[in-house]
Image (cartoon, rainbow, N blue to C red):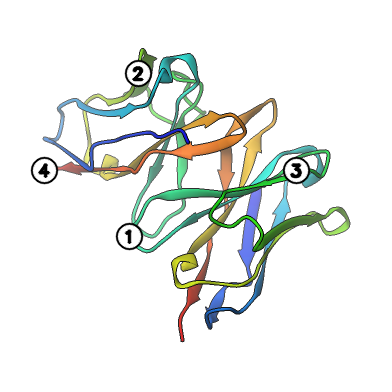
Amino acid sequence: EVQLVESGGGLIQPGGSLRLSCAASGFTVTNNYMSWVRQAPGKGLEWVSVIYTDDSTSYADSVKGRFIISRDNSKNTMYLQVNSLRAEDTAVYYCAKHEYGDYEHFDYWGQGTLVTVSS
Amino acid sequence: SYELTQPPSVSVSPGQTASITCSGDKLGDKYAYWYQQKPGQSPVRVIFQDTKRPSGIPDRISGSNSGNTATLTISGTQAMDEADYYCQAWDRGLWVFGGGTKLTVL
Protein backbone atom coordinates (compact mmCIF):
# COMPACT_ATOMS: atom_id res chain seq x y z
CA GLU A 1 0.00 0.00 0.00
CA VAL A 2 1.34 3.41 -0.98
CA GLN A 3 1.72 5.86 1.89
CA LEU A 4 3.17 9.35 2.05
CA VAL A 5 3.75 10.97 5.43
CA GLU A 6 4.84 14.59 5.64
CA SER A 7 6.47 16.27 8.62
CA GLY A 8 8.50 19.31 9.50
CA GLY A 9 5.95 22.08 9.32
CA GLY A 10 5.42 24.68 12.01
CA LEU A 11 5.33 28.34 12.90
CA ILE A 12 8.29 30.26 11.51
CA GLN A 13 9.16 33.95 11.34
CA PRO A 14 9.45 35.74 7.99
CA GLY A 15 12.87 35.16 6.51
CA GLY A 16 13.26 31.86 8.31
CA SER A 17 13.84 28.34 7.02
CA LEU A 18 12.37 24.87 7.48
CA ARG A 19 12.96 21.44 6.05
CA LEU A 20 9.87 19.48 5.17
CA SER A 21 10.06 15.71 4.87
CA CYS A 22 7.93 13.19 3.02
CA ALA A 23 8.48 9.59 4.05
CA ALA A 24 7.26 7.13 1.43
CA SER A 25 6.32 3.47 1.72
CA GLY A 26 4.87 0.95 -0.68
CA PHE A 27 6.99 2.19 -3.57
CA THR A 28 10.48 3.56 -4.30
CA VAL A 29 10.84 7.33 -4.63
CA THR A 30 13.79 7.02 -6.97
CA ASN A 31 11.62 5.29 -9.57
CA ASN A 32 8.94 7.98 -9.64
CA TYR A 33 8.55 11.67 -10.23
CA MET A 34 7.71 13.28 -6.89
CA SER A 35 6.26 16.74 -6.27
CA TRP A 36 5.32 19.19 -3.57
CA VAL A 37 1.95 20.93 -3.88
CA ARG A 38 0.75 23.58 -1.45
CA GLN A 39 -2.58 25.02 -0.44
CA ALA A 40 -2.89 28.37 1.31
CA PRO A 41 -5.68 28.58 3.90
CA GLY A 42 -9.04 28.65 2.14
CA LYS A 43 -7.36 28.69 -1.28
CA GLY A 44 -6.71 26.30 -4.14
CA LEU A 45 -3.88 23.94 -4.99
CA GLU A 46 -0.56 25.25 -6.28
CA TRP A 47 2.19 23.05 -7.66
CA VAL A 48 5.54 23.99 -6.08
CA SER A 49 8.33 21.68 -7.18
CA VAL A 50 9.18 18.34 -8.78
CA ILE A 51 12.14 15.98 -8.60
CA TYR A 52 12.53 13.71 -11.61
CA THR A 53 13.89 10.20 -11.70
CA ASP A 54 17.21 11.49 -13.04
CA ASP A 55 17.52 13.83 -9.99
CA SER A 56 16.85 16.94 -12.03
CA THR A 57 14.41 19.41 -10.50
CA SER A 58 11.96 22.14 -11.43
CA TYR A 59 10.24 24.87 -9.46
CA ALA A 60 7.28 27.20 -9.72
CA ASP A 61 8.35 30.80 -10.33
CA SER A 62 6.91 31.79 -6.93
CA VAL A 63 9.51 29.72 -5.06
CA LYS A 64 12.42 29.56 -7.50
CA GLY A 65 15.68 30.44 -5.80
CA ARG A 66 14.24 29.99 -2.29
CA PHE A 67 13.11 26.35 -2.14
CA ILE A 68 15.19 23.23 -2.78
CA ILE A 69 13.74 19.78 -3.43
CA SER A 70 15.80 16.66 -2.80
CA ARG A 71 15.51 13.03 -1.80
CA ASP A 72 17.39 10.44 0.22
CA ASN A 73 17.16 7.10 -1.51
CA SER A 74 18.41 5.19 1.53
CA LYS A 75 15.50 6.56 3.58
CA ASN A 76 12.97 6.52 0.73
CA THR A 77 12.21 10.11 1.68
CA MET A 78 11.77 13.36 -0.20
CA TYR A 79 12.52 16.79 1.24
CA LEU A 80 11.70 20.42 0.61
CA GLN A 81 14.08 22.97 2.07
CA VAL A 82 12.11 26.19 2.32
CA ASN A 83 14.19 29.34 2.80
CA SER A 84 13.58 33.09 2.95
CA LEU A 85 10.00 32.41 3.94
CA ARG A 86 7.32 35.01 3.34
CA ALA A 87 3.80 35.39 4.69
CA GLU A 88 2.45 34.24 1.34
CA ASP A 89 4.23 30.89 1.77
CA THR A 90 1.81 30.04 4.59
CA ALA A 91 0.08 26.87 3.43
CA VAL A 92 -0.41 23.17 3.89
CA TYR A 93 2.36 21.48 1.95
CA TYR A 94 1.47 18.13 0.40
CA CYS A 95 3.86 15.67 -1.12
CA ALA A 96 2.44 13.88 -4.12
CA LYS A 97 3.53 10.92 -6.18
CA HIS A 98 3.23 11.09 -9.95
CA GLU A 99 1.69 8.04 -11.53
CA TYR A 100 4.35 5.76 -12.94
CA GLY A 101 3.97 5.94 -16.71
CA ASP A 102 1.83 9.09 -16.63
CA TYR A 103 3.87 11.83 -15.01
CA GLU A 104 1.29 14.44 -15.94
CA HIS A 105 -0.69 13.93 -12.73
CA PHE A 106 -0.63 12.75 -9.13
CA ASP A 107 -2.02 9.42 -8.04
CA TYR A 108 -1.22 9.58 -4.32
CA TRP A 109 -1.06 12.45 -1.84
CA GLY A 110 0.15 12.72 1.72
CA GLN A 111 -1.88 14.21 4.55
CA GLY A 112 0.04 17.49 4.42
CA THR A 113 2.11 19.56 6.85
CA LEU A 114 1.20 23.12 7.77
CA VAL A 115 3.74 25.91 7.44
CA THR A 116 2.74 29.19 9.05
CA VAL A 117 4.93 32.21 8.40
CA SER A 118 4.24 34.92 10.92
CA SER A 119 6.04 37.18 13.37
CA SER B 1 1.64 30.80 -18.27
CA TYR B 2 -1.18 28.35 -18.79
CA GLU B 3 -4.40 28.93 -16.87
CA LEU B 4 -7.39 26.77 -16.02
CA THR B 5 -10.69 28.40 -15.07
CA GLN B 6 -13.43 26.79 -12.97
CA PRO B 7 -16.67 28.21 -11.58
CA PRO B 8 -16.25 28.92 -7.86
CA SER B 9 -19.40 27.04 -6.93
CA VAL B 10 -21.99 24.63 -8.26
CA SER B 11 -25.16 23.55 -6.48
CA VAL B 12 -27.17 20.41 -7.13
CA SER B 13 -30.12 18.64 -5.57
CA PRO B 14 -29.65 15.09 -4.32
CA GLY B 15 -30.15 12.57 -7.10
CA GLN B 16 -29.61 15.12 -9.85
CA THR B 17 -26.64 15.55 -12.19
CA ALA B 18 -23.86 18.01 -11.42
CA SER B 19 -21.50 19.30 -14.08
CA ILE B 20 -18.29 21.14 -13.25
CA THR B 21 -16.40 22.79 -16.08
CA CYS B 22 -12.73 23.60 -16.50
CA SER B 23 -11.65 25.92 -19.29
CA GLY B 24 -8.22 26.45 -20.79
CA ASP B 25 -6.72 27.31 -24.14
CA LYS B 26 -6.89 24.18 -26.32
CA LEU B 27 -7.38 22.09 -23.21
CA GLY B 28 -8.79 19.33 -25.41
CA ASP B 29 -5.29 18.84 -26.84
CA LYS B 30 -4.03 17.95 -23.38
CA TYR B 31 -5.15 15.45 -20.77
CA ALA B 32 -7.42 16.76 -18.01
CA TYR B 33 -7.35 15.37 -14.49
CA TRP B 34 -9.76 15.86 -11.60
CA TYR B 35 -9.31 15.69 -7.84
CA GLN B 36 -11.88 15.69 -5.06
CA GLN B 37 -11.03 17.30 -1.74
CA LYS B 38 -13.28 17.11 1.29
CA PRO B 39 -12.82 19.50 4.25
CA GLY B 40 -9.68 18.75 6.22
CA GLN B 41 -8.60 15.99 3.85
CA SER B 42 -6.02 15.57 1.11
CA PRO B 43 -7.01 15.64 -2.56
CA VAL B 44 -8.08 12.35 -4.12
CA ARG B 45 -7.80 11.59 -7.81
CA VAL B 46 -11.22 10.87 -9.32
CA ILE B 47 -10.56 11.17 -13.07
CA PHE B 48 -7.33 10.79 -15.04
CA GLN B 49 -6.56 11.08 -18.75
CA ASP B 50 -9.86 12.88 -19.38
CA THR B 51 -12.22 9.96 -18.83
CA LYS B 52 -10.60 7.19 -16.76
CA ARG B 53 -11.66 6.36 -13.23
CA PRO B 54 -9.26 4.94 -10.63
CA SER B 55 -10.38 1.82 -8.83
CA GLY B 56 -12.80 2.64 -6.06
CA ILE B 57 -14.29 5.70 -7.75
CA PRO B 58 -17.98 5.10 -8.51
CA ASP B 59 -19.07 5.01 -12.15
CA ARG B 60 -21.52 7.85 -11.56
CA ILE B 61 -18.45 10.09 -11.74
CA SER B 62 -17.30 10.68 -15.32
CA GLY B 63 -15.20 13.08 -17.32
CA SER B 64 -14.92 14.50 -20.82
CA ASN B 65 -12.58 16.90 -22.57
CA SER B 66 -12.94 18.64 -25.91
CA GLY B 67 -12.07 21.97 -27.43
CA ASN B 68 -11.31 24.38 -24.62
CA THR B 69 -13.37 22.71 -21.90
CA ALA B 70 -13.10 19.66 -19.70
CA THR B 71 -16.16 18.61 -17.73
CA LEU B 72 -16.58 16.52 -14.61
CA THR B 73 -20.05 15.03 -14.36
CA ILE B 74 -21.54 13.45 -11.27
CA SER B 75 -24.80 11.58 -11.89
CA GLY B 76 -27.22 10.75 -9.11
CA THR B 77 -25.37 13.15 -6.81
CA GLN B 78 -25.23 12.11 -3.16
CA ALA B 79 -24.48 14.05 0.00
CA MET B 80 -21.08 12.34 0.13
CA ASP B 81 -20.14 14.06 -3.15
CA GLU B 82 -20.15 17.49 -1.49
CA ALA B 83 -16.55 18.64 -1.77
CA ASP B 84 -14.15 20.90 -3.61
CA TYR B 85 -13.15 19.70 -7.06
CA TYR B 86 -9.97 20.72 -8.87
CA CYS B 87 -9.06 20.20 -12.50
CA GLN B 88 -5.41 19.90 -13.47
CA ALA B 89 -3.36 19.75 -16.65
CA TRP B 90 0.29 19.58 -17.59
CA ASP B 91 1.74 22.30 -19.78
CA ARG B 92 5.36 22.57 -20.87
CA GLY B 93 6.87 21.13 -17.72
CA LEU B 94 4.46 22.73 -15.27
CA TRP B 95 1.55 21.21 -13.41
CA VAL B 96 -1.39 23.61 -13.45
CA PHE B 97 -4.53 23.51 -11.30
CA GLY B 98 -7.83 25.24 -11.76
CA GLY B 99 -9.02 27.45 -8.92
CA GLY B 100 -11.42 24.81 -7.65
CA THR B 101 -15.19 24.43 -7.54
CA LYS B 102 -17.18 23.93 -4.38
CA LEU B 103 -19.96 21.45 -5.03
CA THR B 104 -22.90 21.89 -2.70
CA VAL B 105 -25.58 19.22 -2.49
CA LEU B 106 -28.72 21.02 -1.35
Is the C-beta separation of discs 4 and 3 under 8 Å? Answer: no
Which disc is residue A27 wearing?
3
Q: Where on the picture, by quarter, is residue B69?
A: top left
Please give the name of the residue rendered at 57% of the width and 37% of the height, measured from the top-left corner. B94
Decide which of tag 3 and tag 1 comes sooner along the chain: 3
Which dot, 2 or 3, sits closer to the camera? 2
The amino acid pointed to by label 1 is Gly
Dot 3: what SS? Answer: loop
Q: Chain of mark 4?
A: B
Crowding at dot 4, Cα within 10 Å, few <14 / some 14-19 / many 20+, comes out as: few
The extreme right residue here reads: A74
Is label 3 or label 1 in front? Answer: 1
> In screen coordinates, is B55 left or right of A65?
left
Q: Position of residue A6 (x, y in %)?
A: 62, 62
Image mark for residue A31 = none
Q: Which mark is residue B106?
A: 4
Does residue B23 appear in the picture of this structure?
yes
Q: Amino acid at mark 2?
A: Asn
Mark 3 belongs to which subunit? Answer: A
**Is A46 or B73 nearer to us in this picture?**
A46
* Residue found at the very far bottom of the displayed protein: A119
Spatial separation of the CA atoms under disc 4 and disc 2 = 29 Å
Of mark 4 and mark 2, the one earlier in the sequence is: 2
Question: Which residue is the site of mark 2?
Answer: B68
Disc 4 to disc 1, C-alpha distance: 21 Å
Determine the CA span between mark 3 and mark 1.
31 Å
Kind of residue at badge 3: Phe
Q: Which mark is residue A42?
A: 1
Judging from the image, mark 1 belongs to the subunit labelled A
